[in-house]
Structures are given as structure tokens and as C-alpha cells.
Amino acid sequence: MQFKQILPLAILCANVFFAEAQTPPSSISGSLKGNYGEPVHAATIRLQNTSYGTVSDQQGHYLIKNVKPGTYNILIRAVGFKDQKKEIKLAAGENRNLDFKVTESVEQMETVNVLGRTAAQETNRQAFNVTSIDAKKLYNTTLDISGALDRVAGIRVRESGGVGSNFNLSLNGFSGNHVKYFIDGIPMDNFGTSFQINNIPINIADRIEVYKGVVPMWLGSDALGGAINIVTGDRYRNYADVSYSYGSFNTHRSVINAAATSKNGLTVQLNAFQNYSDNDYKVKIEAADIFTGAYAPEALLKRFNDKYHNETVIANVGVVGKSYADKLLFGITMGKNYKEIQTGARMTQVFGAWHRRGTILMPTLKYKKTNLIKGLDVTVNANYNLGTEQNIDTVNARYDWYGNSKPTGSGGERSRSMYKYKNNNGLATGMFNYKISEKQSVALSNVFSTFDRKGSDPLNPTNAEYERPKKTNKNVLGLGYNFDVKDRWSTTIFGKYISQTNISGNGGSAKATTTKFGYGTAATYFLNKNVQLKTSYELTNRMPDAQEIFGDVENQEGNPSLKPEKSNNINLGISYNFSINTISNFAVNANAIYRHSDNFIYNRLNANQSKLIADNREGVRTWGGDAEIRYSYKNWLSAGTTVTYQFLRNLQMYEPGVSGVSPVYLDQLPNIPYLFGNTDVSVTLKDVVRKGNTLNIGYNLLYVHAFWLYWPSLGSRAASDGKYVVPQQLSHDVNFVYSIKNGRYNIGVEAKNITNAYLYDNFSLQKPGRGFYLNLRYFINNQ
């Protein structure tokens, strides 16, 4: 009896089971775009009250597979955007395509936690050894791009003075032109002196990507040891962001960023900024009176010929969010700068009237389209700099550090000149990425650049040097393949073919073409959602650039005999995010590096130590590492520490003109910091005085260990020989920012180098002492 009751029930269950097994699954796919067509990546797409969900990729695409038929509520969530819901009904076997346009949430952007999956954090999850800075968190400071970079593990920004001074960025042991700079993936090689990372305000950027060692193929660069990519902010459809700061040494900075976009996609974008400083800070210097000869070994004197100012405007007009273009912009970059030159390559020389002027006039074209045809993304950029540079040295006098001058009767302070010239820099780039499948893609990039210096000097019209051609053409062709399993593992392989032609000599008689081939790979693996492993390798080549070959008409001598560099770069890295509880979060990143470079190009002092000159060393081996740990408590406390160690060893056994083994063989390379780090702490207090008002308090510590100024084997560390060592440096900065009405009005106060420590850089050039700055910022975004 019991069997007869159970049998029909079993048959019914079996029928349901087999019917269910024969029901074909469904899927949902599509893309997410922002207010005017930009892809939204790292967004979460979930079917509520189910386990179905995924995350959008770099192009904003998503796919949810094996979904049972039925009715669902799909929920879209992305950092900085409003949540979006939609009810959908899936039939059996249906492959539904759903595209979404998500709307930005200003309030959410203002309160993003530093450990969240922002665009910057998503960049850090690439296979490459990359660190991404969320620039938005620094908008209420007076920092420029270089100041933000100086807080990144593995980076030391080295400047020859105050605002507008020459700079040299060291990245894991590579420095100067070993590291290449980009803005939105466009090389900045031809932007001129009016547009450099140490005069571009942080407000221009959305984030800054630092690639250490291995550089992605899509950047199209012949960098030897790293790249900096400034990603500009285009998040808002209609907005205005205005700031002004004033501070010590009569320093003024102002920034205007604005955009207006119509409903049909017509857009106008404006970025304008200005920097001014007298740079009249005090320096401790060996000084001698030019008239009496009275000598002071440690005189404390003001700099007096170091004024700098620049003004730059970037304007774009075009369309966004069209079927034929996500972005099509025609633009112009215009600017000028004025720079007084206080010293030569070392502070033993002082000048009282020598200065430079420069301009930038650069038309630009920017085009971008995802899915031009299904799976194909295209980016094309072009620009040409018509700007000029002029070196002005007309005073027949010699100055001392007291500001006294004595007529010399000779030509100029260094070399009588009013040389005015154009570098005639042009650039064209193309990037094509084709998605073969959900996991596979191939990419092709090509970057062509040209340099052609032409000029004349009315004070030296017959100088034959000005008539000699100074021209280079360079092309970098790259091909890459990527296999990616989202949040599991990813591998990229790529190759680069570089060709460069240099033309110099009388009538262009010296013409030489050099070609090089390099390749590399990068891979990452996620042990779990909190632990990521990385490794990358590249055989890279770098051609000498135009400034190294022909000089910069200031403190860099030209060297036409430079050879191309080659380096084997290896990186290993690990990232670990963990929480002690729901309110205490940690993020740990550590990277190990190894570099073996042939024909390594480095800057040394010329014979009389008045200028720098680029030269080759047969071999240099570098090893070291960097690490960062960050901690956040709830949403009001954030703290972090970075440390970097890098050891560069000279492998050149024989020196020209020196018999026997070189006395500096196996020496540590001089004038390069090898141990340095940062510590920062910030506190955010919400609803201070009134709801919607926020107070941020921040502190930053910079430490640089003492390092050799000259070759270690040619000097000693004894106190009596202190001139051979750049001393240990310790600098403290504090800042207070009060934001009103959810960030519409912002008032910032900063104190830099509050202990007035003596800070030094390239060849012991001294940087500014204690300074105080006030920053006012107004921001409005109208959707």
C-alpha cells in the first residue's frame, strides 16, 4: 500500500527533474556607459535575490551566463554612479542584450574609501607592476603632478629648485629620459617647457598611472624603465572647477576646469592654469664677495634670479556619445613660460640676468570609439607643436651670491646669446584593440614622432652651429595578445619594433637609421579575492632622445655619439587586502625588481662642472624593491607608509683613457638616492559645524637617506669630506581642508617642510625651505 502511494510521487519528481534538465539556460549581456558615452568598468551587475552576477570589464562590457528563465530585478552598482534597477523577464534559452547608461553621483564620488574598487584601484589589478593614484583626493591641495608622484613607492622626484625648476624623476633606479610621460596615453615628448609634470596642477588629472619597469604595449613607447600616464578628468557633462592658491616666496597658482555638453552630444571643454613664484627662498651656500674676496663657507642668502611663471590654456570642441565616435575632439593647447636661471648644474655657479622664454602652440585631434565594428575599439590622436624657445644671455657681467656684479667685457654670463628656435615636434598615434572572445583580445599600436630644431641668433648670425640640421624621426610599432579570466588570472604577451633616424652635420651629411626589436610578457593570478600575484618581463630598447643628442640650450650639453640603450627588466609583486573586522582594513603591496642594462645612458657633469652631459655606460645592474602598507578605520582615518630600496652597480670594467681596470668598476652609481620613503596620515571629520561640511586633516613625512654625490671609490664619507655626500633629508608637511556644502566650497591651508630642513637634489641643488599656502576651490556640477 505504501509503495503504491510513493510510486506516483517519484514519477512526478522525475518528470520535473528531466523537464528542468532539458530547459536551456538563458544569458544577459551588454555594456555600461556613463553620461556621455565613456565605458564604465568595475561595475557590479547582479540579479537581486539570486547568486547570478558579474563585473563589467575595461570596455564596460558584461555577461551573465547560465541563468534560469524567469522574472528578475537587475541591479547596477558602480563607484561614483547612482544605482540603477530594471525588471527583466527571460524566456528559456534567450540571450538578452541590455545596454545601460548610468548617471554620475557627485556625493558618492566625494566619499569613496581609499580601499574601494575605484578606477584607480581597478588599474592596480592589471598584470603589470602599476600603481594608480586617485587624483580626486588631492584636488583641494596645491600639489602639481610631480608632487603627487613623489609620494608613490619606488618614485623620487628630484628638482633643481622651486616652482618651474628642472626635474628628474627616479623610478626604481631609472631616471630622466628612461621614464616616459603620457597624457591620456599620448606621449608628452613634444609638449615643450610650458607643459611639464612639475607645472601641471593635480586638478587636471582624474588619476595618475605609474608603470614600473615593464611598459604596456598600448602606450607605444621606447621607455627603458617605466612610464607615467596622466588620465585627465572627463567625468562630468557640465561642470566648473576653479581654484586659486597663494603662499610663501610670492607663489600664486590658479586653475580653471570646465565643460559644457548639450543633449545631442556637442561638447566644449576648457582647462587653464597658471603658476608664478619668485622662488626667493634662502639657501646655505659657499659664497665669496666678488669685490673683496671675503669668503663665507655657510652663508645664508636669498636666491635672486629665479622668478618663474607659466600660463597654459587647453581648449577642445567636438562631439561625444555618437554612434560613430565615443569622443571626437578638435583642440588647441596654448601657453607661455618665463624662467630665470639662478645656477648652473651645481650651485657653485650663480647667474644674475640669464633667463629663458618659451611658448606652446599645439593643435590636437582626439578620436575614440569602442565597438566601431563588433569587438573593435579604435583610438587615434595627433598633434603638432609650433611653439618657440629662446635663450637670453646678454649681460656682460659676473655675479656673486650676494647679488653683486662686476663687468667682465666678455660675451654674456655664460655665452652671449639670444638664440630663438623651434623644435617642430609632431606626433601621430593609433591604437586598435580587437576582442576575439570574452577572454581573448589582440592589440596593435603605432606611434610616429618627429623633431626638427631650427633657429637663429641675431647676436651670432654667422654661427655655423645654428645652420646644422638637428632632426630625428622615430616610429614605435607594437603588437600584443591578452588572455583574461576576470578576477582569476590574466596574461599578456607583446612585441615592439622601433626605428629612429637622426640627421645632423653640415647639410645633413650625418644621417643614421637604427632599428631595435623588443618583447615582453606580464601575468597575474588571484589566489583569492584578497591576494594577487604579479610577474612581468621585458627586453626593452630606448633610443637617445633629441635633448640628449642636441642639448637643451641651457644646462644640458648635446652628445651625438650616444648609443641606444637595452635592458632586461624583471618584476615580481604581491598585493594583499584584508580586514581585522568590518571597520579596520589593510592593503599591502610589495614589489621586487631586477634590471640589467647595456649602454645605460646617465647624466654626468662636464669637465668644468657647469653643465650636464648624457653618456653611455657599458653596463649597469639594478636590484631592489618597494613596499606600501595602508590602513583605514571606518571612513574617517587613513594611514600609509612606503619604502624603496634600489642598488645600481656599475659594470663597466674599463674607462676611455684609463689603463687597467676602472677604479669605479662595481661601484654604486653616484647621485642617485637608494633608500627613501613616505608616511602619511589623514583624518576626515564629517558634518563639522553643519551637515554636509567636512574637515580633513593630513600629515606627510618624506625621508631620503644620505647618498653619494660622486663615485664612492673616489671620495670618503668622513665629516671633513662631507661635500662628497648628499646628506640625509627629513621633511614634514601638514594640511587642513574644510569643505562646505558637500564639496562645493573648499578652503585649504598647507604648511610644507615645517621644520625648515635643508633639502637637496640633483648634484646637491637646494630646494625651498618652510612654506605656508592657502588654497580656495569652488566646484559645481550640473547634470
Image (spheres, rainbow, N blue to C red):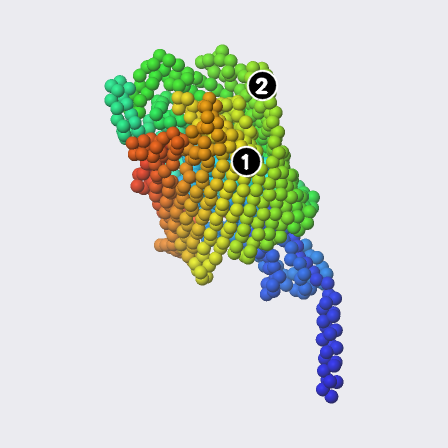
Categorize mark 2 by other alpha carbons within 10 Å: few (<14), some (14-19), many (20+). Answer: few
Identify the residue at image location x=60%, y=22%. Answer: 512
Q: Secondary structure at mark 1?
A: strand
- The reply to whether residue 492 is in sight is yes
Badge 1: residue crowd in 10 Å (few <14, some 14–19, many ≥20) = many
At 57% from the left edge and 52% from the top edge, which residue is drawn?
525
Q: Secondary structure at mark 2?
A: strand
Which percent across, then down, holds residue 176?
48, 33
Residue 240 against residue 428 in the figure, above or below: below
Q: Amino acid at mark 1?
A: Ser
The quadrant of the picture occupied by the N terminus is: bottom right
Residue 677 image point, x, y percent: 40, 44
Q: Report if the CB atoms under discs 2 and 1 are less than 8 Å apart.
A: no
Query: Residues under labels 2 and 1: Cα distance?
Result: 27 Å
| Disc 2 residue type (three-letter) | Ala
| Residue at numbered disc 2 | 510
Residue situated furthest bottom in the rendering? 1
Labels 2, 1: front one:
1
Does residue 362 appear anywhere in the picture? no
> Residue 772: x, y in percent?
33, 40
Residue that mark 1 sits on: 567
To which quarter of the image does residue 49 belong? bottom right
**In the rendering, which numbered label is found on residue 256?**
none
- The answer to whether 174 is drawn above or below residue 689 in the figure is above
Q: As drawn, is 16 to the left or to the right of 522?
A: right
